[in-house]
Image (cartoon, grey):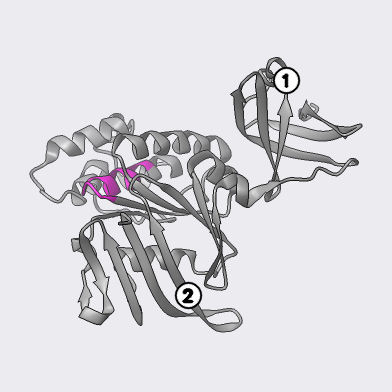
Amino acid sequence: MSDIVLRFCKKLLGSKGEFQLQVDKQLAFGEFVALFGKSGAGKTSILRILSGLENVENGYIRVGDSVWLDSAKKINLPPQKRCIGFVFQNHALFPHLNVYENICFGLKNRQDKVFANELIELMDLTHLKKSNISRLSGGQSQRVALARSLASRPQILLLDEPFSALDNAMSKTLQNTLKEIHKHFKLTTLLVSHNVSEIFSLASRTLVLQNGEIIRDGSNDSIFIQKNLNAKIKLMGEIVNIHIENLIATISILCENEVYKITYDPTEAARFKIGEQVILADKTFNPVLYKYRIED
């Protein structure tokens, strides 16, 4: 029996009129799944339906042994009874509450202040505990939003483009924090993102949506990797993964929204690191990487 079953449909209104969102997927506990596709494809609606913030015409959602939605049996648990943590793109923090109070708002048991303090420490927010929300940077605000979403001890964490408003350095820092949190709390996580680099950094599985339909489902490699490298190619990109096994290094380079995977000598590969900007060139069918530097 699958851990999580998502089966529902809903009419959505897009730029070209109505279309049908159709989902029939099974997830395993502990998975980190990315939802990828153009704006308006239905990615955020999936998160909102799963969390109970949007209703559907017909659907069934089961998490473990608990049925959250069954249209046929008129079962539809409200959001507060679904074990969900939701981090929105705009943080959605309460401006009249300080950092500590915002996090405590998410507690199931308002007396569980010990756990709130653990989250504050985990998110490196101790020095900002009593700070007003208006004084926080974008990265700090997102840390508070993430801590508040974890305060209810959710089974499933939903992330709607949580890094889109952050600069690259802060985004990378928070991605590392999120990876640790996903493992530490043994979460099942769904991430909406347009950023392939984020997806490679965080997710192990990607669902690609187009006009409400999931048209592809697989590993990041199977979704994004370009298998053929043109002999005359010369592209600038970002290293999203380096894997060394059996004396062979495999480097994945993101160029726009396509990822190229090349094999490399492990000694040479040690010169590079994830997140580094590089130029991918082809020399007599032998892919070569050059570090990209902006001239002063």
**Could you give the CA–CA distance between mark 2 and mark 1, rounded to whole angstroms?**
45 Å
Query: Label 2 neighbourhood size at 10 Å, few (<14), some (14-19), many (20+)?
Result: many
| Rendered image quadrant of residue 57 | bottom left
Tag 2: amino acid: Leu
Residue 274 visible here: no
Give the x, y percent position of residue 85: 30, 53
In the picture of the structure, the residue carrying the numbered disc 1 is: 265
Q: Nearer the viewer, residue 294 or 13?
A: 13
Please check the rendered image and state whether residue 146 is part of the magenta-colored stretch, yes or no.
yes
Q: Main secondary structure of the magenta part?
A: helix
Residue 241 in the image, given as x and y percentages of width and height: 60, 33
* Circle 1 SS class: loop
Direction bottom: furthest residue = 17
Labelled disc at residue 97: none
Is residue 114 toward the left or the right of residue 289 in the image?
left
Q: Is 226 displayed left or right of 199 in the figure? A: right
Is 198 placed left or right of 118 in the picture? right
Tell me where the magenta segment starts and ends, as one range.
143-155
**Which corner quadrant holds the C terminus?**
top right
Residue at figure coordinates x 84%, y 34% from the top left: 281
| Callout 1 amino acid | Asp
Q: Which residue is mark 2?
A: 21
Does the magenta-highlighted stretch encompass residue 150? Answer: yes
Q: Residue at x 72, y 18 (%)?
A: 268
Q: Secondary structure at mark 2?
A: strand
For discs 2 and 1, the disc positioned in front in the rendered view:
1
Q: Residues within 10 Å of mark 1 (few under 14, many from 20)?
A: few
- In primary-sequence order, the first of circles 2 and 1 is 2
Residue 214 position in % (x across, y down)? 53, 66
